[in-house]
Amino acid sequence: MFKKGLIALALTASAGVHAENFAAHEHGVANLMLSQEGNEVMVELDGAADSLLGFEHQPKTEAQEQAVIKLVKLLNTPDKLTSLAQKCKLVDTRLELPFAVAEHSHDDHKGHDDHDEHDHDEHNKDHDHDEHDHDKHNHTGHKGTTHSDIRVSYQFDCKGQDVENIQINLFANLPHLEELRVEAVSERRIMVANMDKDGMLKW
């Protein structure tokens, strides 16, 4: 598990000034938190689904389903987002989405197409109806809320690596992102910055 003693104290010290900005749900804006203790580095990215994906509802079209699949693959490939992943060993990744991964739905549709070839049209209509009801039941809470957020966290082992200079490549990969609010906490310092383009982060 990631140790949070020193990091928690540091974040508490800076929370009064920056908590409101980091907590806000704003389209076009995402938050990037970096924290280091010893060899362990935690990186967390969170923001409105609109900032990272371009919409905040359950995917309704094939294009939106593919957009979710693409984002999931991207967020599970941290070396495309930051040079930290190229320097350190990835220990853990945790991704939180406000709705089901579209790839599952896409596979389900492929399965239904196969059934159609076997003259089970009526059965498929019933099954589709049940499936839509099931989806509606699962996502009622999300449809009823105003905002949807996406969060991903990475835990790295950076033994013997220089992590004071990190290249950030979020804007090149997330076209809906306009502003990145960064808070970096280490045993050396606490840093808060805003970024509107990719570049080197020194902390």
Image: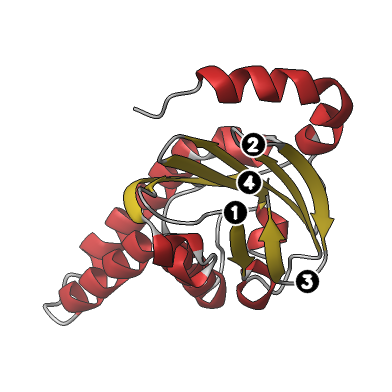
The residue that mark 1 highlights is 164
Among the two numbered marks 1 and 2 on one chain, the one whose residue lies closer to the N terminus: 1
Among the two numbered marks 4 and 2 on one chain, the one whose residue lies closer to the N terminus: 4
Tag 2: amino acid: Arg
The residue that mark 3 highlights is 197
Among the two numbered marks 3 and 1 on one chain, the one whose residue lies closer to the N terminus: 1
The residue that mark 2 highlights is 188
Tag 1: amino acid: Glu
Among the two numbered marks 1 and 4 on one chain, the one whose residue lies closer to the N terminus: 4
Among the two numbered marks 2 and 3 on one chain, the one whose residue lies closer to the N terminus: 2
Q: CA distance from mark 1 to mark 4?
A: 22 Å
In percent of width and height, residue 55 lies at: 68, 60
The residue that mark 4 highlights is 46
Among the two numbered marks 3 and 4 on one chain, the one whose residue lies closer to the N terminus: 4
Q: Residue at x 17, y 77 (%)?
A: 114
Tell me which corner region of the image, top left, top right, bottom left or bottom right, holds residue 92.
top left
173 and 15: which is toward the camera: 15
Q: Is residue 61 above or below residue 27?
A: below
In percent of width and height, residue 68 lies at: 50, 65
Q: CA distance from mark 4 to mark 2?
A: 24 Å
The colour scheme is secondary structure
